[in-house]
Image: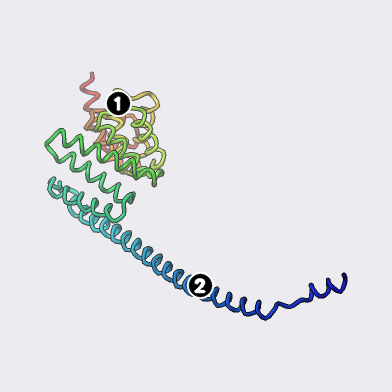
Amino acid sequence: MEELGAVVLGARPHRGCQLSMASLSKVTNAMARPNARVVAAAGAVLLAVVAFESLRLGLGGLIVELAQSESDRRTAPGRTAPKAELDRLAGFYADSLAFHPGNPWALESLGVADLARMRATRSPLEAQALARDAYKRFREALEQKPASPFLWANLALCKLYLDELDDEFRAALRHADELGPWEPSTQEIVLFASLAAWQSSDAAMRRATTAVLERGASRNALKLFGIVKRFKRLDLVCPLPGYHSIAAQDCVAQASAGR
């Protein structure tokens, strides 16, 4: 039995078996070569997809930059762009989204363009539709940029224009104020929306509005004072030292009128 075991353990394959294994090796190699070609082809396809995606995203970003440059030129200080030009700008941003759907910067820019078109149109129905479109774009962009104070501020502005002064409106104002307390444009939108909704605001919202005025006095007093004066709420700035130099005359006039 030990000899039998030694023979079995030390046995070599029969020559016929060697030929079979050689054939099997050839078959395996033959199968490996097509697999290598398949892998190479798959790699080429993957590179092509990556290249296409890079081109698509690059074109989308380029269109956004071109549209933004055009927007800056056409909405320069002292110039009000007609609706036809604003429609053209909105078309640029829409084209960008065709290349890169969901691009938060394109969505934000298109939302801002929608609000500008809303102000330029003479049709109440079109204005409401544009405000609704802008709201949807800001909401979608916030899914990718939830820490943007500008998106939250513009979302609150849309809610104001849609006359939806609900919890979402108040939360949008709060987020904008918390995320961008020193951003001048955020301060202006938050102040405007808060004063426009003053009658429906609670004590916390009114305290936050006063805090915006106090912070903005150092760098943005003139614009914030203009918004306050538009809403005839000089009582909010007259007690604040940061506005004395620009509001003193109006505050004195208001005090004299109240006597």
Residue 258 screen position, x and y as percent: 23, 20
Q: Which residue, given by chain and number where applicable, does mark 2 sit on?
A: 31
Nearest the eye: 245 or 77: 77
Classify 23 as above or below 218.
below
Please give the name of the residue rendered at 20% of the width and 49% of the height, measured from the top-left corner: 90
Badge 2 element: helix
Classify 13 as above or below 50.
below
Please give the name of the residue rendered at 81% of the width and 75% of the height, measured from the top-left corner: 7
Residue 186 screen position, x and y as percent: 33, 41
Nearest the eye: 65 or 76: 65
- Label ID, residue 179: none
Q: Residue furthest right?
A: 2
Q: Which residue, given by chain and number where applicable, does mark 1 sit on?
A: 198
The answer to whether 138 appears left or right of 117 in the picture is right
Nearest the eye: 69 or 164: 164
Dividing the image into 4 quarters, which one contains the C terminus? top left
Nearest the eye: 118 or 96: 96
The nearer-to-camera label among 1 and 2 is 2
Residue 149 screen position, x and y as percent: 37, 42
Residue 45 screen position, x and y as percent: 39, 66
Cα separation between marks 1 and 2: 77 Å
User: Residue type at mark 1?
Assistant: Trp
Please give the name of the residue rendered at 11% of the width and 37% of the height, measured from the top-left corner: 122
Please give the name of the residue rendered at 25% of the width and 58% of the height, measured from the top-left corner: 63
Q: Residues within 10 Å of mark 2 (few under 14, many from 20)?
A: few
User: Residue type at mark 2?
Assistant: Met
Q: Residues within 10 Å of mark 1 (few under 14, many from 20)?
A: some
- Residue 117, image quadrant: top left
